[in-house]
Amino acid sequence: DSFQFPRDGRSVTQCRICDTPIKAFMTFGRMPIANGFLTPDQFPQEHFFELAPAFCPECGMLQIVEQPAPEMMFHENYAFFSGTSRYMQMHFQRMAEQVMATILAGRSDPFVVELGSNDGIMLRNFAAKGIRHLGCEPSENVAAVARSQGVNTLCAFFGRDTALKIRAEHGPADVIQAANVMCHIPDLQGVAKGVEALLKPDGVLIFEDPYLGDVIEKTSYDQIYDEHVFVFSAISVKNAFARHGLDLVNVEPQVTHGGSMRYTLAPKGSRPVASAVEALLAKEVAQGLDKAATYDRFRANCETSKRELVALLTRLKGEGKRVVGYGATSKSTTVLNYTGIGPDLIEFISDTTPIKQGKLTPGMHIPVKPYGDFTARYPDYALLFAWNHKAEIMEKEDAFKAAGGQWIVYVPSVGVV
Ligand code: TMP
């Protein structure tokens, strides 16, 4: 047994969806809370757990064996604000417009609920159109930002109890949405029960999350961190929600978060199943997402990626080059702690989120500095941790390139661009 860390009671030996015994196929080792940016006085209390993914051979769900308690991740100092990216704002505006033009078309006084509504980046589009809406968000600080922008927000974790409370107060929902949230919730069964309790018979559940097919194809192992208890595929989503009377009726690939999938689910038999669903299920079988051997290959690819990134940074340091990180993303916590890359190899990480600035990264304790520190004195190399925002970042960083700066990337493979 490779596990070296004490369990905190939230680790599983059976699949969270179907109870089949599961075992980790690799370990990323000792990991802190991905968004746990901290100050030196907090070092003694820093929480670590073992980050180890497992694949359920029965229902196909990829999940981490141990997940820290939700209160350790989502609280009044949650460091992730969705609204920091302009592209993401546009993405959610388009998603809201699509929902209004299709599902909500012709409905009188519809009601839209969003789980994990964060700073209201999606719901503000419904609020602006006067559509009844409610966000359900457990982190008080981001919920407060949403409210200040006119987005109705309930500060709570979503489950059957919360669903019944919402229904009693507002009536049933036409649409329940979630973006980059569903994969955070270990009790997916509880969420499904909540959806059952809140959704109209002709309503839909629409959610999107980083897609397993992309993670495997691109070796984007940094999508695996504490908050992401699951990495979904069409296979696993179909199986998980079928248990709660919901059909997977559509799938739509998204470019966000380095490759995501949007899943639409509806009460059994209430809607036709789009041909895209069968097509994606077949593609996943062809890619081997349903086979354990695929995850052994993924582990080998992660090991190669780690070796190459450490070798590259070590060489650059030997050459006396300055390397700075770009974007103190949640994902970077996995990369840094798995590879053991710390402040000796990366001078600091530049990030535009005020709550992260002036703090140190979880585990490896690399300083996080405001964006101005990056532009004030360009480094020789910038390691692109926010690789999922590459298009947006390249668009605005011409001056860095012009000054001779180079980008280091590690997805889909380690290199300088
Ligand atoms: P995410 O990858 O989880 O969306 O987090 C993106 C992080 O990167 C967030 O902390 C903000 C930061 N960031 C920048 O510092 N500059 C940028 O141009 C963008 C798009 C993000």
Image: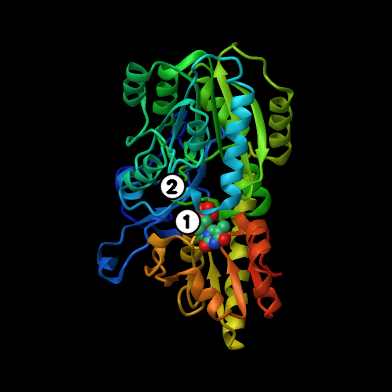
Mark 1: C-beta under 8 Å from nearest atom of ligand 1: yes
Residue 227, labelled with which disc? 2
Q: CA distance from mark 2 to mark 1?
A: 9 Å
Q: State the SS at label 1.
A: helix
Residue 150 shows in this picture: yes
Q: State the SS at label 2.
A: loop
Disc 1 crowd rating (10 Å Cα; few below 14, some 14-19, many 20+) is many
Residue to which mark 1 is pinned = 330
Q: Percent position (x, y) of residue 404? A: 69, 80
> Does residue 31 sit above or below 209 in this rendering?
below
Q: At 69% from the left edge and 30% from the top edge, which residue is drawn?
A: 281
Nearer-the-camera pick, 330 or 353: 353
Which image quarter is the C terminus in? Answer: bottom right
Disc 2 crowd rating (10 Å Cα; few below 14, some 14-19, many 20+) is many
Q: Quadrant of residue 37?
A: bottom left
Residue type at the position of mark 2: Glu
* Label total for image: 2
Residue 246 appears left or right of 3: right
Q: Are marks 2 and 1 in contact (CB under 8 Å)?
A: yes
Nearer-the-camera pick, 265 or 189: 265
Residue type at the position of mark 1: Ser
